[in-house]
Image (spheres, coloured by chain):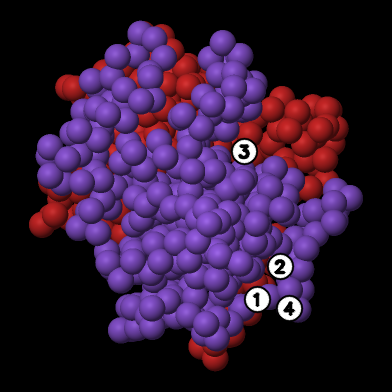
Amino acid sequence: MNTNLIPAFVRRNSFIELSARARAESLMDPGSARELVGPFDRIESPWLPMQGIAPEFDDGCIVLKGTIGGEPAVVAALEGGFQAGSMGEVSGAKMSTALDLATRDSKNGTKTAAVLLLETGGVRLQEANLGLAAIAEVMASMRALREYAPVITVTAGTVGCFGGMSLAAGLSSYIIMTREARLGLNGPEVIEQESGTEEFDSSDRALVWAINGGEQRVGMGVADELCLDDVGEIAAAVKKCVMAGLPATHRSQQVEPYRKRIASLNVTEQIDPLVLREAWNHERYSSGKGGSR
Amino acid sequence: MSAQPGVRGKAWFQALTGKDSPMDGDPGSVLAADAKLGDESARFLCIVPNPNARFPCARHGEAGLEEAYALARRIREAMDIDTEAVKRPIVAIVDVKSQAYGRREETAAIFLAAAAAADAYASARMAGHPVIALIVGHAFSGGFLTHGYQANRILAFDDRDVVIHAMHEEAAARITLRTVEGLERLGHEILPMSYDVQDYAKLGLLHRLLHVQDSDTPTVATVAQVQKELVDAIADARAGATDLRNRLESAGALATRKAGLAARALMEKQWSTA
């Protein structure tokens, strides 16, 4: 069969269709990955069974230690298929510990990058306050590692990255997205519930992706790489970010440029995402400073 | 629950700083001031309701785009001033409804704005500023992550109007397919789901729970009491680490976060042989 006749988007090896564990493995050098606190260690949520919900032995967070492009790295992946990738006590502890140990090694001379695969609705409401606390701790751990090594967030889809974990994404050194991915603090359904359909019609899928979608987030400069849903392409983007090391300034430290952008928005009506993309992108290139790079 | 988030926060900001207006160039919803605390000067920050806010979904004490960047700006300003000096304490007075739930906010990447404020608080803590969160009212969800949860010591008033939670009851009930009554009942059985601050205190995340008489209306005596608690928390923060390990080492954490601590201990053990 002549494979040249088959378009690239058909021939691609989908990343989105993989489980969190397979996603994480696909990003690391072959044979280098070892899972830490895996399902056979059986550390599960104590709070879910109390509410009649089946827990999982990995609590929906898979941590692999290994190398990427020969460099030490740790990957922590949230399984969107378990409780919508939500953060609970155990999954949060696994992610923040992985980041803390990467920081410890980096401090001791073995620079260790972290890659977070975020498919999550944010806090696991069945573990409410411990989920929120876990997110605060993940954020603190990310901020600490960033002194030494990059923290790379990948959000590929289809759950998206929402709620408190969107702040974690905001703290990363680099964000990699696909067109299918969405990134935002409040999901469209939550805004509709809190502020009404006239504020946000969550059934309007085109509007949702125009605002939260990967193409828009990269286009407006708040994320870094837009990839096809392809394992090879995403792995190459992750490797490129690991090799790039720390950005000169992290995006979440760029207060004045963003404060001025917010101040200059016309907010008398809803903001057209395309107009905002052009305005922010234009500033990004004309100032020569870039988003984060 | 008190009628309006931010009202009590504003009362305590005024009582502790003697000021009640924003700094030049800041939105009306963010109060920031340096004021005497013990024998030094501390920077106080608070989000308050602003019915005239530019963003319609951020008029009732929510953490929105302008609020987040104003906080980040004022924290980083204090850090810049103190680069070569004693790091001043930063006190986040927390009475914040939630993050702002609006389409404008999402379009302009409120996730990044909120991260910028949290980054500033965490950066200040790591630079050696004692960062104290004083929860006098509501501390909800993304609002708390934006404003206060990166503090190295958290103090909270012990009364019925103080609510620390991931989501307000009505929304949490809808999303978890329960009734509000069912959720309240569950809160009594499942500690992290409780809306009661005394239950929250059992999680080991708080430095101290403060019993303050008539906490809606600060008096000379209660202000002195809260100032003393702040001074003690600052001294404790200065004597400790600049990370959040105290939240894992507390007696409350050892009792209620056993599973998370077990995961942490096992990963530490496995890490070096991986």
Chain B, colour shown: red
- Work out whether disc 1 and disc 3 sit on a shared chain: no
Disc 2 to disc 1: CB gap under 8 Å: yes
Please name the residue shown 71% across and 25% down the image. B170
Q: Is residue B82 left or right of residue A45?
A: left
Q: Colour of chain A?
A: purple
Residue A243 in picture, x, y percent from top left: 30, 71
Q: CA distance from mark 2 to mark 1?
A: 7 Å
Of pointers 2 and 4, the one earlier in the residue sequence: 4
Q: Amino acid at mark 1?
A: Val
What is the residue that sits farthest to the front in this orientation? Answer: A2
Instruction: Indicate the quadrant containing the C terminus of chain B: top left, top right, bottom left or bottom right.
Output: bottom right
Report the amino acid beneath label 4.
Answer: Asp
**Mark 1 or mark 3, which is nearer to you?**
1
Q: Is residue A277 visible?
A: yes
SS category of the residue bearing label 3: strand
Vertical placement of residue A41 versus B224, above or below: below
C-alpha distance separating marks 3 and 2? 25 Å
Residue linked to disc 2: A58
